[in-house]
Amino acid sequence: MLNYRKNFLWIIIGFFSVACAQVPPKLAPLPRDLEFKRGERFQLVCSCREGEPPLTFSWVRDGQTLIESMEVSVRRFDEFSSSITISALREDHAGNYTCIVSNQGGSDSSTVKLRVLVPPTWLRQPYDMSVLSGARVTLNCETAGTPKPTVTWRRSKGFNLQQMETLTATQWRTGEDGSLTTSGVKKEDEGFYSCEVANGVGEGLRKTVRIEVQVPPSVSVSDAEKTVRKGDSVALRCDVSGDIPLTISWGKANRNLPLISEDRIKIQEDSTLENSSSSVIIRNTAAEDTGLYICTARNTYGQSQATIRLKVVEQPSTPLNFHVSEIWCKSVRLRWKQPYNGNSPLKHYIVRYKRKDSLTKPTETKVPDSQNSVVIRDLRSSVTYSFHVLAVNDVGASGASSTVHATTREEEPEAAPTNVHIKSKDSGGFLLSWKPPPVDKWNGDIIGFSIGYKRVSHGSTQSLPFTFKILPVSLFLANPGLEASASREYEVCGLQESSSYTVVVQAMTKAGIGPASEPVLVKTSYGESPQVPSVTLLSSQQTVITLRVEPTGRKRASPTQYMLHIREGNGHWLKIPLAPFKNEYKVGGLLAGGQYKLYVTARNGYGDSGPSEVVTFRTEQESVSSSMFEEEDMAIPFYQKLSFIIPVAVSMTTIFVVPIAACCCLRKLNTLQAPRPEGVESRGFTYTASGSGECTGGSAPRPRSLPPQPAPTTSTSSSSGHYSTLQNYGSVIPVNDPRFSQFMIESKLANQVVSLPSKSNC
């Protein structure tokens, strides 16, 4: 009950306190923004619409209590209003003005923003400028004013004020403060520039300035490097820009004096209002014209240079010291020194080669420019080649170097002898014939041949060794008409009769022995061919000689026919068959006082003998008329006398020869008559054989043959060395091979010593 009474008491006290309190003030609203021009009078009145006095008024500007001064005064019209007055506004009078009123009941305030409108004024003005081309340029146009002034730039075309236009060039930039800036002024930027400023308050501002752009020389070239062939003409040109007057000159690096016009060099200039150019024209360029050419331009504001590097190129010089440094069997190494490159990098070298004295086009091999040597491969052994080298650059090829010759080393032949066959055989041997390998397979000079033979042992499993006979080439040089590809013959003796033999032939060079030919099988005969007959000249008369021919050797080798070979002086050899029934023969038809040579060979069913010794004789001089036969020699039968032979020969010729000749003439009407062989002799000989058996030999044309010589004495002993065809055919033969020992012995016998290497140098 007591608490209830206390609460009621406090309610009564609060009610009376509220009833007795003052009403708080309330101001009449002020305008939010006010604008006045600079210099105008400004007055602001603040009135309180509600609230009980006493009221208190105060003024604040921009949060600071307003202090009265000569220009600013504060007045109170009555107890409900207050005012401020500024006699002449300035820029610094602008701000936020707040009126505050208060009493015991509360307070109120109102704020107004005062803007003082100020026409534009200069802070930084532009001024006339004279600048170098490319310089950074800034034209100031900084102003103050309220509101903020706007800046407009205008420029003229050139220095004509009547043609002003708004600036739109992209290289110019307008800053926040109104300034105009370019990072690199150009000649075309030259002219009048006008800065126009306005903010709508009063009159705007305008300032026109002059910009002069001073252009120093600028030199440019289209080609910083030029290449020209020696002897051609070339023009070096530089283009120059800049303020006139301009002076252009040319010079050459490492040369103190300027370049001037002369016989080969001409300098010419070409100028326009905007640009100039200068050219150096060089005719018939030479190597000394190579260098750095300098074009220099000068004017009042400076100088500029540009360079052109001229390269006069030509064909390179001939490679130096070209020589053969190494030689092998099928290749050679060539070396040289790098020549002058003609002021142009070398591309490669060209090596040309061919067989010496060959008329064919040489073979070419390209060699990189980084190399000064090359190995030429795939050559033929023991062949002389001609070589020369050229250097090549972009201009062309140099002249050929001096020609060098090199002969490749020999090696063993690549091929075996060909056409190996047996020409004849007897009981103790056979006559072997073959042809050398093809010349292009020799790989050197053939110094001999190796003939290998072995007996074929039928029914035996053991292979018999080969026996080799080394034949120096000197054995075949007695016949001067023997060509490189002609057949060779050799008689192998001392064999077993009626036995089979396998025969191979190999060619030899100083480097070794080549491969063997295909084996040839031969079987010796049971009988024997005749031995060389014995010939004795018994008598010599004017036209007739008497011979004695006797067989030699065993009876089983008896001849069945003799062949007389005779010639006069150096004439052709003629053959006359002789019947072997008697030993003495008379040969007629000779010339009185003539020089003759003769020899005799024997033949039977097993082969021919070698030639007998050559008999040389001279017939007696003619003292009285002689005939083909000695008429006083009654031993000559009547049918061998001229009185009988001539009529019979004429008759036989008429009967047989004339019809045959007529047929031949008809067949060859439209062809040329073949020339008569050199070796045909038309003159005939006659012979008679003493004894009961008589045979006649008539005269007949004889085909040309090489002069026979006495057969060389051949040794019947054979080498005891053994030879394996599987291991050594075509390989390098060691010096201790039995064939080489035999070969050296027989070479010395032939008066020709041949030196054989121990191994191939290839």
Image (cartoon, helix red, strand yellow):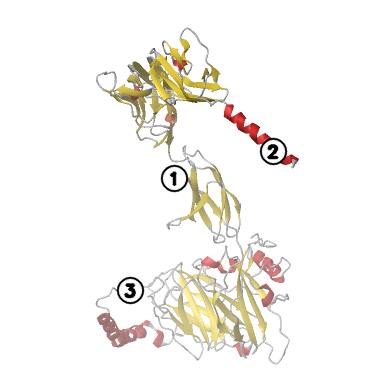
Q: Earlier in the sequence, mark 2 or mark 3?
A: 2
> From the viewer's perspective, is residue 695 above or below residue 357?
below
Instruction: State which quarter of the image contains the C terminus.
Output: bottom right
Residue under numbered circle 3: 674
**Badges 2 and 3: C-beta atoms under 8 Å apart?**
no
Dot 2, how many residues are within 10 Å of its Cα: few (below 14), some (14-19), or many (20+)?
Answer: few
Residue under numbered circle 1: 397
The residue sitting at the top extreme is: 70
Q: CA distance from mark 2 to mark 1?
A: 132 Å
Disc 2 secondary structure class: helix
Near-viewer residue (561 or 166): 166
Q: Is residue 428 something that shows in the picture?
A: no
Q: Earlier in the sequence, mark 3 or mark 1?
A: 1
Percent x, y of residue 706: 48, 71
Residue in the image at 49% along x and 8% along y: 69
Disc 1 secondary structure class: loop
Near-viewer residue (722 or 323): 323
Q: CA distance from mark 3 to mark 1?
A: 55 Å
Give the total of numbered labels. Answer: 3
Residue in the image at 49% along x and 91% along y: 693
Residue under numbered circle 2: 7
**Badges 3 and 1: C-beta atoms under 8 Å apart?**
no
Percent x, y of residue 330: 58, 60
Which amino acid type is shown beneath numbered disc 1?
Ala
Front tag of 3 and 1: 1
Which amino acid type is shown beneath numbered disc 2?
Asn
Near-viewer residue (733 or 55): 55
Disc 3 secondary structure class: loop
Q: Is residue 435 something that shows in the picture?
A: yes
Which amino acid type is shown beneath numbered disc 3?
Ala
